[in-house]
Each structure stands twice: as structure tokens, then as C-alpha cells.
Amino acid sequence: MGQHILAIDQGTSSSRALIYDRAFSVVGGAQQEFEQIYPQPGWVEHDPEAIWGSVEAVCKKALSESGLSATEIAAIGITNQRETTLLWDRNTGECVYNAIVWQDRRTAASCRALRKRGLQETVAAKTGLRLDPYFSATKIAWILENIAGVRERAAKGELAFGTVDCFLLWRLSGGARHATDATNASRTMLFNIHDQQWDPELLEIFDIPQSLLPDVEDCAAEFGVASCEWLEKDVPVLGIAGDQQAALIGQAGLQPGMTKSTYGTGCFVIANTGPDALTSQNKLLTTVAMRIDGNVTYGLEGSVFVAGSAIQWLRDELGIIDSAQQTEGIARRTGVVDDIVVVPAFAGLGAPYWDPEARGAILGLTRGSSREQIVTATLQAIAYQTCDLIQAMSDDGIVPSVIRVDGGMVNNDWFLQFLADVLNIAVERPTNVESTVLGAAYLAAYKAGILANAEQIAENWHCEARFDPRMPGEQRNYLLDQWKTAISRIATSE
């Protein structure tokens, strides 16, 4: 049996594959971006074949770079952008429409209509989620209603639904397995997180046939086998988790109260609440944090739709930076900006506002405002959004003493110091900031027997840098008041 793990991280803007040895050191890796498709304002799609092609390419490149053969891979772990929705033909594997991405807002009116029918409480009680376009259910319903012939084909059992992990598993296994894990299922708005089953009442509400749905497994399970046609040897897929839950595992957030914040395309904070599915009074989500050996661990989650993608916006749309790495030097030279506020609500506002109709704004501009100030204010906005989530968690009774952070943005020391300052909480960056893909590797390694227990995950976590708050309270309060004023100016009413 091989002694290495191939971990796939299929993200919103790129796909990545890393190969780990038994000590969880990376011995090979590759990453590839793919196109973002914006058919209309507020709509976001991906080409399913671009997703699959990028995953296939990075896995083969990572294997080549490592110098290993497929016989030396013990198992595959998968983590993925959550909520993104695909429907495909069970015979051909061909998707009936592009993947509708989690950021997509096209079903805002449908969600509003469901809320007016008084269904928010029913949905929240069963799923821990809010009636929002973010989640998969209304995306599935949109495809069924708007793509010719799809509902009829679904009724005949010809089609399959899946989040990205499920789609990849189907392709890897040559169509032999249609399955997902409990964390991804918990983000569809169709899965009852208390009885861990697809819910008939929710399927009726959204008018979705059960025949579309995959089997639901633990996060560490025998999901199926990646065909030898793909890697020249059959390799079992033994771990799957949605990206934010995988990051919590990668950060060794295995005990109740432990909290992580990930800065990728969006920003996602999850606090481990143990076996208790806490109900938020402050518009946070209750979600399945992990399900291992049949034991469910829940989490309280806050989701911000735009974080790292705001930096991409500065680079690609505004053209005022050449690379994300430039932002740290710009912010150091500029210092804290207290008269300009950027609200990057490009895909509406997530928690704790849940305003899908909101759009972005820059407030406080004068003739003397500079590109450096806009760049710095954008970094600050990401910290302010995190502060909103942590405040909501605190109001719900989860008061973290430290936040573990990961994702591409956390290499920026200026940003992390500002984050600690506005949160008034210590921020810790691990030696390995790629916690998401590491979490997928841990799951596969656990099922493969390379890891004997969860304690070994905790032993692998090491703090590389700690940022303690040092901003005066008066300045912190002023900045947060400015942020709240800016939010009030862009918020919409239903």
C-alpha cells in the first residue's frame, strides 16, 4: 500500500492538488486557474469541463513533480467550493447547464417569495441555514425550471445533482459512485442536519425530485475508487469535506470553542460547537462541521462573500495593483485609512446582514483620495466584515480568545495586525496556511490508517506568528462606527 496522500482542493477561482508524505510535508503540487463566467449582473457560473480539466491537469502535474508513481498514493482526499450546483446526465456525465456558483444571486426573488410564504423558520429549523440564493436548493430549482427538458429528464431518473465534490467523485470513479459527505450535504438546504437525512418536506418545498440526490457519507469514508484510466492505478477516495469545514480540520479545530477564519475568495468563520447544533439569534448559520465515525460535530458559521476576490477586483478590474502581494507594502506606507470606506458587496451581503440585493460602494472619496487609500481601505473592509461575524458569534455566546487564520491573504502581516486590532482578539497564523487542502489530506489519511486518531492532527499544528491587538479602543470604535454607517447606506429593504 502507498504511503502518500493526494489532496484535491477545487476552489472558486482555481484547482489545486498537493501530495503529502506521512509527515504531511508537501512533496509535489500544482495549481491552475480557470475562467469565471458572468452572464448577467449578479450571475456567476463555471464551465464544468473547465473544472474537471483543471483538476485532472493539476493532479497529474503534482504526481509528476513529486517523482512518485500512482502505486505510491494510498488515498485521495477532496475539498471543494461549497454550494456550487451541477446537474448531469447519469449515462454520459455531461452537465445540462454550467455550474451555478455559490456567489450567484439569480434566485434572490425566489428566496424572497419563499420567505413571504413564512418558510424561513421551517428551513432554518431543519437545515440551520437561511433562505438565501447562496445555497444549492434554489439553484437546482432554477435549472429544473429554466433549461428545456431538464425537469422531465429528472423525473425519469436520468439526471444527477451534486456539489463539486460529488461531480468530481462521479468523474473520478467513471460514474460508479454518486455520493457526497455530510458537510457538503448540509449546505444544500435540502439536508436535515439533525437526523442526517435528505428531508422530504424540503424537497417538496423546492419541488426537487429525490432521484437527483447522492448518497451521504461521513467525511472519512470509502467513497469509491478513482479509476486506473485516470491515474494509471485504482486509488481509493477516502476523504471529502467542504472547503471551510476542511479548513477547520486542517487548523486542528477539533474541540468545542475553537474558531478559524479562512480568507480565500470569501471569508468564512467557523466555531466548533461540539455535539450541540446551536441556533443563532444573530443570523449566523448552524452547519455540520464534520462527521467522523458516525459522530456529528456542529459549527456556528458566518459567511462573507467577498474577501480575496476584492483584491482580485483591485488587480483585474480597477488595475490599481499588479499583484496581491503589493497590498501589504501599500498599506504599510499609507497607514490606517479613517476617511474612506470600501464596502465590497459585489455579490450582496452575507452574514449577519443577508442582503442579496446590496451592491458595493466606496464612500468618503474626495479629490485628494488616492489609489493607495482605496487599496488599504479594501483590506480594512475585509477585517470589518470579519468583525461583524465575530460580534454576532459573541452575541450568540461563542466568545473566542484567539482566532486561527488561513488562506492566501494571511501572508499579509499588515492585514493580520489590523484584523487583530479591530477584533480586539489575538490572531494566530499556522506554519502551514493551506489548511483547506491539508484538512482533506487528514481525512483521507485517517481512513487509510496513516493517522491513528484526531490527536495526531493537533500535534501537527504549529503557530508561525501571533498578532496581539494594540489599537487604542477609541480609534477602534471610530473605525467600526464608520463601517456601520457605510453598511447602512448600501443596505436594501425587502
Image (spheres, helix red, strand yellow):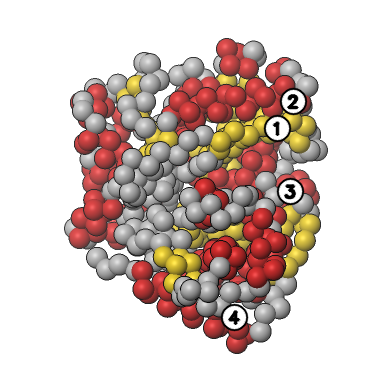
Which of the 4 image quadrants contains residue 43?
A: top left
Label located before the other in sequence (2 or 1): 1
Label located before the other in sequence (3 or 2): 2
User: Dot 3, how many residues are within 10 Å of its Cα: few (below 14), some (14-19), or many (20+)?
Assistant: some
Q: Is residue 10 above or below residue 296?
A: above
Report, in whole angstroms, how far the alpha carbon at label 3 lies from the one at label 2: 20 Å
For disc 3, the marked residue is 432
From the viewer's perspective, is the residue at label 3 or at label 2 nearer? 2
* Rendered image: mark on residue 490: none
Q: Secondary structure at mark 1?
A: strand
From the viewer's perspective, is the residue at label 4 or at label 3 nearer? 4
Q: Secondary structure at mark 4?
A: helix
Report, in whole angstroms, how far the alpha carbon at label 1 lies from the one at label 3: 14 Å
For disc 1, the marked residue is 29
For the C terminus, the quadrant is: bottom left
Q: Are marks 2 and 1 in contact (CB under 8 Å)?
A: yes
Which of the 4 image quadrants contains residue 485?
A: bottom left
User: Dot 4, how many residues are within 10 Å of its Cα: few (below 14), some (14-19), or many (20+)?
Assistant: some
| Residue 142, horizontal then vertical, whole percent | 26, 40
As rendered, which of 415 and 274 lies closer to the eye? 415
Residue 27 seen in this snapshot: yes
Report, in whole angstroms, how far the alpha carbon at label 2 lies from the one at label 4: 47 Å
* Rendered image: mark on residue 65: 2
- What's the residue at 20%, 60% (across, down)? 116
Q: Is residue 239 above or below residue 233?
A: below
Q: Secondary structure at mark 2?
A: helix
